[in-house]
Image (cartoon, helix red, strand yellow):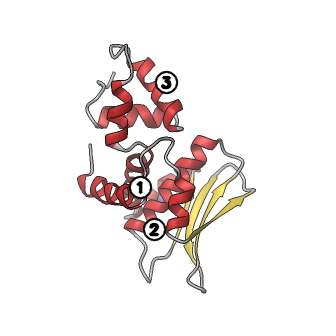
Amino acid sequence: MINYDIERIVNGIIEKTKISKVPVDIETICLNYDISLEPLDADDTLSGFFLVNDNRKKIIGYNKTHSENRVRFTIAHELGHFQLHCKKDQNFFIDKSSKFFRNELSSSGILKQEREANAFAAALLMPINILEKELDKIDNKGDSNEIISKLSKKFKVSEDSMKFRLINLGIIDPN
Ligand SMILES: [Zn+2]
């Protein structure tokens, strides 16, 4: 399912920061919003966080031991928390991937925010307009796996993220 509000917000960011090619330069987008990036030597269960500290400084932390694609998605996800959810009384978001945490999530309102931050990340890293242009360049459109493989490399996202995005946009059929 496509969240049109989020797609609209992301399109605004893409236009404002003049993003026209892929992989989307996520670090420059953070710079534009005055957000510092902090690599963390953390254990595998921590993906990242977004924080506004006491000096009003905005920081995105990410697990530097994760793959480049995963780090890019984490940073885009945290940027989503900043754009969609950050308020005076809620200015710290932490993302862990342990099972325990997931159970906690599903019984609270946090789950909606996590889904929204994921939708934001997907929209930002795989912008519709650029996706359509890149899709036009692929000859064999009958082979979903080939489309996913080629586009995920070009956009520097995981194959799962690309597959999910293409299904959501109605470009390929879910199997
Ligand atoms: Zn999150």
Q: Is residue 120 left or right of residue 5?
A: right
Can residue 104 be seen here?
no
The reply to whether discs 3 and 2 touch (Cβ–Cβ < 8 Å) is no
Mark 1: secondary structure: loop
Can residue 26 be seen here?
yes
Q: Is residue 111 left or right of residue 157?
A: left
Q: Earlier in the sequence, mark 2 or mark 1?
A: 1
Q: Earlier in the sequence, mark 3 or mark 2?
A: 2
In the rendered structure, which amino acid carries the disc numbered 3?
A: Ser
Some atom of ligand 1 lies within 8 Å of the CB belonging to the residue at label 1: no
Residue 123: x and y in percent read 37, 48
In the rendered structure, which amino acid carries the disc numbered 1?
A: Lys
Report the residue at 53% width, 53% height from top: 26
Within 10 Å of disc 2 (Cα), the crowding (few <14, some 14-19, many 20+) is many
Residue 166: x and y in percent read 34, 33
Report the residue at 72% width, 56% height from top: 42
Foreground tag (2 vs 1): 1
Q: Earlier in the sequence, mark 3 or mark 1?
A: 1
Mark 3–mark 1 distance (CA, rounded to whole Å): 26 Å
Q: How many marks?
A: 3
Mark 2–mark 1 distance (CA, rounded to whole Å): 20 Å
Q: Which residue is mark 3?
A: 149
Residue 155: x and y in percent read 49, 37
Mark 2: secondary structure: helix
Q: Which residue is mark 1?
A: 18
Mark 3–mark 2 distance (CA, rounded to whole Å): 30 Å
Quarter of the image that includes the C terminus: top left
In the rendered structure, which amino acid carries the disc numbered 2?
A: Phe
Q: Which residue is mark 2?
A: 82
